[in-house]
Image (cartoon, grey):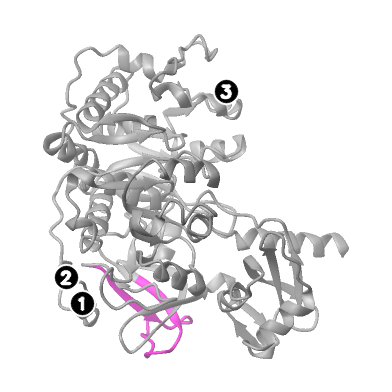
Amino acid sequence: MEERSWHRHYDYCVPTSVRCPRLGIHELVSIGANAFPDKPALNFFGSEISFWDLRTLIQKFATALGALGVEKGERVGLHLPNIPQYPIAYYAALSLGAIVVNLNPLYTADEIKQMAETTGLTTLISFDMMLDNIRPVVADLDIPRVIVTKVTDFIQGMPVSTAKDLELEKGWHHFSEMIDSVPSPKRPRIEISTEDPAVIQFTGGTTGIPKGAVLTHGNVVSAALQAFMWGSATTGIIPAERRSVVAILPYFHVYGNIVALNWGMISCATQIMIPRFDIDEMMNLLANFPEITFFPAVPTIINAVINHPRAEELQLDRKIGLLNSGAAPMPVELIEQVKDMGIYFSEGFGMSESSSLGLSNPILGLKKAGSIGIPFPDNDVKLVNIEDGVTEVSVGEPGEMIMKGPLIMKEYWDNPEETAKQIKEGWLHTGDVAVRDEDDYLFIVDRIKDMIIAGGYNIYPREIDEVLFQHPKVADAVAVGISDQYRGETVKAFIVLQPGEECSTEELISFCKEKLAAYKVPKIIEFRDELPKSAIGKVLRKILRAEEEAKKEAQA
């Protein structure tokens, strides 16, 4: 890739182009198994699995899957939280050339069925706590192979379950029993190209119909390698023997899959696995580790951790090496708080369609609060006119962000129409509106589909969110556009207050009037105990908007 103007901002150790090794994702496990065979690859509530033993377990499970008939190109659904069984199944399936379909464990039976039908699942790997959700799906779709595990099966000192304990249907298989049935595993000798599809990652979408982004082996390896190199100014100088990463982001989500699971493998880091977010439980867990090399998270988790009453006692400012935020905008006030603690920090942007990466602020170099930073190596980004999707806009002018490079997905699974809409001449059209400043740093203005048009004015709700977060009594906030008879749309804000605080609608509106143009000020405020969020803590604006639309229809 030719020299780009933003390359001047890269940290000293980050190359402008990365030579990505041509290997399958599953081969990343061998880096740690070869260099640090006895180092823990996984730490699950104190139970450890070394890199060597993890590779052995993966090969055993791959051998067992192959014996059941799993072949290259088949879709294997992983319906698992962050437990050791996930990486074992993930890398085993990929080593056979199968395509992993990531399924959120909290999906309803209907959601699982839709995704299983869309992808033509031939194997489903699930766990004890969700059997009631998968039974009707398997009955309806007649999925040939079903494998079940128990969450606690890999915790040392806990009894390992059996198929009989879990009362599995006839013909279903038990995860640990499959592994135990293979005394002498063999490395699968399946030819895998970097262009082969590896993962189907469903996007949330705004239409209610999720699309399956197909990521290749090359996409995922490139993303993991680039994430590692981008952070190497701090994480790279920590000896590999000491490296660790907090795996609170779900592995089934593209962000956690790249920056926790595969970053952990490529950097030989111990993954501190946390299957669910419970703040007190998490603080207890963090207390057990003297240092944490890398802590990728989302703003809601970062906010909860650094403002926890035990944060000072645990000396988080000394414990955490590098904090990374993604998946949702991080309020500027929270960024300043992290910087005050002296923790290295970076915020970036990515999508399922771009292997979770795209742009980021440098770790050591110039960072701009509220900016998503600059493009990763070998990736190109342009801002184009929202109307024609082609003409580049000037500095400071809003435009749709389009991206091109090794991170961009192959296609949407079995959906050529949507693929053609989203990828044009190799450029991924993100649907996000951004502005570029004179230093080539990008600032997301908002999603095109989230834009509010009130009284002829274009309003980007993220700007309102930022102002609301500045109010000392506000813990969480999101603005949405709701239909209005006179203005077309009007602004409504949903607010969660800090514990023990009281605040009036008038106080918040008055606060906004001091910082926003009159047409952007929320006209309606609704206080809530919590806001709807995705599996990784991203506020779901579209759900709130749908609730408002349903209310209007009911009143009509």
Q: Is residue 102 left or right of residue 209?
A: left
Q: Is residue 115 left or right of residue 90?
A: right
Q: Tell me if residue 461 comes above or below residue 79 in the rendering.
A: below
Q: Is residue 145 visible?
A: no
Question: Is there any visible trace of residue 336 in the rendered image?
Answer: yes
**Mark positioned earlier in the residue sequence (3 or 2):** 2
Q: Which residue is mark 2?
A: 16
Instruction: Pinpoint residue 212: horizontal percent, then vertical percent.
Output: 44, 49
Is 525 one of the magenta-colored residues? Answer: no
Query: Looking at the picture, which amino acid does disc 1 mark?
Result: His
**Residue 417 in picture, x, y percent from top left:** 45, 58
Instruction: Give the quadrant of the N terminus.
Output: bottom left
Q: Is residue 396 magenta?
A: yes
Which type of secondary structure does the marked residue at label 3 adopt?
helix
Residue at image mark 3: 139
Amino acid of disc 3: Ala
Q: Are marks 1 and 2 in contact (CB under 8 Å)?
A: yes
